[in-house]
């Protein structure tokens, strides 16, 4: 009787689950090719033989699907795993777990790793499971746990890729655990090995990236508090030079020249030499024109841009400088074309500007521009001679946000936006791009103005109203809520929310999303949620919100003394837009230098103050910002542990 009752209750609970959310969702691979053909292709890519009746022959072979199929998503790997037999099932599950870790979604990776068939079927599967488990602990912010897991590695069974991953994870774990000296010793040992250049380059770059998170004062403190040897002190010195002088190329060039002369055999020498080769100075014989709205309501931004452009010049005036002339079109964008013509007549070799969309549009009817020109704003004209453009619009930011979310494997989105033209335009651009990239749109809504309680809107959009009705109906059928213990829940297909709003509204909206059980979802916002000022207590309301930001903005934040109220007060007198335009001005100097041919042997790729800058075939300067997430009230760079390793291994 007891078994019958238990079966009856179980049946009711399962039925209730179906009633709550309808039929189960089947994940369908995004491509039309069959599961068989996909698996055969993956097998061939890794050197395996295959057969139609037996997709992968049963023998202990390495089948790294994550590397063999770099464009495949975690969900598609899981869908294929459901239909595969062992050991292919475990291999596909490992690939899915790796994708989730690369996307910074550790909870999903943890569940998959726990579900993989035990005992593990091959030595490669065992090794890969160990590596991903160690990476998972790091992603969860627990380096000690990762180090304990790494202590169980049997590296004699690792292939070359796994050995490289193990060394990388060890360095990361030691650095995260504040064992900087031990990490540097590990890199030193690796650098002494033969045939390990690529591996060492990864460890060196990882170490410098970690040290770059420290302020100048932190680095000085590290060097004083430990008995460092000469090589280890040189690490601190190089990181200090890159952090302090990184955005001023003239100063950085001199600093790197000095460091390289002092440390000819240092493991980081290759990175320092590469960074030095990227530096660029405009020939002093060149005439550069800047077309800016200096005497306008945008004066602060225009002046910041101008000063950023000039920041790469020699402060000591010891070297000849190019002629830089500023042409002011004030509050009248229509005068920008006249200023452009004037700059050409005056003999400009390169023109930067006009600054702003309306001013740029005054040149849109020209089939070609007279001299090489970097337009600071969206160029609505087709590709034309001598025209290069840097898009600063919120639409461009919106496109980058949704592209990042799709790259992480997120699938179904909710779009929320303020009732203003700029916000609506950004949201519409984001939604269109999201759909083009294969994302699904769950819903969209305008955030009500002049209210502080969004409960009604949130409950409807998250499906909580419908879920509660199903729970109520089920409890009426059963007659007692204690049997089922059912709770309302967020619609299960939703995994990301995009907020196109300002900081004030975001601080009110985000805690309410958390209260209504949406805290597990990824949440993106415009960089309007960050003004560069330390405000930890208020920014706790933005916990988990992700946005894109210029590296220099993060550096300014890190170097600020958050405990000094005078510093915070002084920072409050500057606007974030001013700091961002200063970074754009600095990077415009570097772009100008490259386009003038001073560094013509190199493909345009600039690690700039505003981000990584590249040039596409349409002469559009593409800018890749840093990804940032609020953690404990502070903006923290979002870079999943495995992302660097995957990107490094995929280099040509």
Image: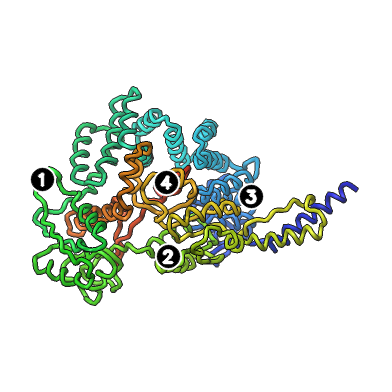
Which residue lies most toward the top here?
227
Task: Give the left or right position of residue 540, taking residue 303 as reference.
Answer: right
**Between disc 1 and disc 4, whose residue precedes?**
1
Q: Is residue 377 visible?
A: yes
* Badge 3 element: loop
Measure how far apart labels 2 and 4 are at the Cα level: 23 Å
Q: Nearer the viewer, mark 3 or mark 4?
A: 4
Badge 2 is on which residue? 423
Measure how far apart labels 1 and 4 are at the Cα level: 37 Å
**Between disc 2 and disc 1, whose residue precedes?**
1
**Between disc 2 and disc 3, whose residue precedes?**
3
Measure how far apart labels 2 and 3 are at the Cα level: 50 Å
Between 401 and 154, the residue placed more toward the observer is 401
Q: Above or below — where is 552 with respect to 350?
A: above
* Badge 4 element: strand
Badge 3 is on which residue? 86
Q: Is residue 208 visible?
A: no
Measure how far apart labels 1 and 3 are at the Cα level: 70 Å
Q: Position of residue 639 (x, y in %)?
A: 43, 47
**Between disc 1 and disc 3, whose residue precedes?**
3
Badge 4 is on which residue? 635
Graded by Cα atoms within 10 Å as few (under 14), some (14 to 19) or many (20 or more), the crowding at tag 1 reads few
Q: Position of residue 351 (x, y in %)?
A: 17, 63
Mark linked to residue 549: none
Between 275 and 624, the residue placed more toward the observer is 624
Badge 1 is on which residue? 317
Residue drawn at point x = 53 percent, y = 31 percent? 148
* Badge 2 element: helix
Task: Give the left or right position of residue 138, taking residue 196 as reference.
Answer: right
């Amino acid at each position: 009787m007891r078994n019958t009752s238990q079966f009856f209750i179980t049946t009711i609970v399962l039925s209730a689950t179906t009633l709550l959310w309808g039929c189960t969702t089947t994940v369908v691979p995004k491509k039309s090719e069959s599961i068989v053909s996909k698996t055969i292709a993956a097998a061939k890519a890794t050197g395996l033989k295959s057969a139609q009746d037996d997709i992968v022959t049963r023998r202990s072979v390495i089948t790294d699907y994550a590397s063999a199929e770099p464009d495949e998503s975690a969900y598609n790997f899981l869908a294929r795993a459901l239909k595969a037999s062992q050991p292919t099932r475990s291999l596909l599950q490992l690939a899915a777990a790796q994708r989730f870790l690369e996307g910074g979604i550790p909870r999903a990776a943890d569940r998959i790793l726990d579900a993989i068939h035990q005992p593990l079927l091959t030595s490669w599967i065992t090794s890969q499971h160990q590596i991903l488990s160690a990476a998972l602990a790091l992603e969860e912010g627990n380096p000690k746990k990762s180090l304990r897991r790494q202590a169980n590695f049997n590296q004699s069974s690792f292939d070359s890729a796994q050995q490289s991953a193990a060394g990388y994870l060890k360095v990361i774990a030691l650095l995260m655990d504040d064992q900087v000296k031990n990490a540097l010793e590990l890199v030193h040992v690796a650098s002494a090995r033969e045939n390990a250049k690529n591996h060492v380059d990864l460890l060196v770059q990882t170490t410098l990236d970690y040290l770059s998170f420290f302020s100048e004062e932190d680095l000085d403190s590290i060097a004083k508090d430990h008995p460092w040897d000469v090589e280890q002190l040189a690490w601190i010195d190089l990181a200090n030079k890159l952090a302090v002088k990184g955005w001023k190329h003239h100063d950085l060039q001199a600093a790197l020249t000095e460091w390289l002369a002092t440390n000819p055999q240092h493991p980081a020498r290759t990175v320092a030499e590469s960074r030095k080769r990227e530096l660029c100075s405009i020939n002093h014989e060149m005439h550069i024109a800047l077309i800016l709205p200096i005497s306008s309501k945008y004066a602060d931004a225009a002046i910041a841009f101008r000063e950023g452009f000039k920041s790469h010049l020699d402060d000591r005036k010891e070297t000849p400088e190019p002629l830089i002339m500023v042409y002011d079109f004030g509050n009248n964008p229509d005068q920008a074309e006249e200023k452009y013509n004037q700059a050409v007549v005056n003999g400009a070799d390169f023109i930067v500007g006009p600054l702003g969309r309306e001013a740029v549009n005054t040149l849109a009817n020209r089939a070609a521009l007279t001299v090489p020109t970097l337009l600071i704003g969206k160029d609505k004209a087709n590709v034309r001679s001598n025209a290069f453009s840097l898009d600063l619009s919120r639409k461009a930011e919106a496109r980058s946000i949704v592209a990042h979310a799709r790259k992480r494997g997120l699938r179904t989105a909710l779009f929320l936006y303020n009732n203003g033209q700029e916000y609506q335009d950004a949201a519409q651009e984001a939604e269109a791009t999201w759909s083009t990239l294969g994302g699904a749109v769950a819903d969209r809504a305008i955030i009500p103005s002049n209210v502080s309680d969004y409960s009604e809107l949130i409950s409807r959009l998250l499906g909580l109203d419908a879920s509660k009705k199903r729970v109520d109906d089920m409890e009426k059928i059963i007659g007692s809520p204690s049997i089922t213990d059912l709770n309302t829940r967020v619609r299960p297909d939703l995994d990301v929310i995009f907020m196109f709003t300002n900081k004030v509204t975001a601080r009110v909206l985000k805690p309410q999303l958390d209260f209504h059980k949406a805290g597990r979802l990824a949440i993106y916002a415009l960089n309007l949620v960050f003004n560069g000022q330390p405000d930890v207590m208020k920014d706790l309301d933005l916990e988990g919100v992700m946005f894109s930001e210029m590296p220099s903005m993060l550096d300014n934040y890190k170097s600020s003394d958050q405990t000094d109220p005078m510093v915070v007060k002084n920072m409050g007198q500057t606007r974030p837009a001013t700091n961002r335009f200063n970074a754009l001005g600095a990077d415009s100097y570097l772009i100008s230098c490259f386009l003038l041919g001073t560094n013509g042997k190199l493909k345009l790729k600039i690690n700039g103050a505003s981000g990584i800058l590249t040039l596409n075939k349409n002469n559009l300067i593409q800018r890749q910002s840093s990804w940032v997430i609020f953690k404990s009230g502070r903006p923290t760079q979002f870079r999943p542990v495995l992302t660097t390793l995957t990107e490094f291994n995929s280099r040509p």
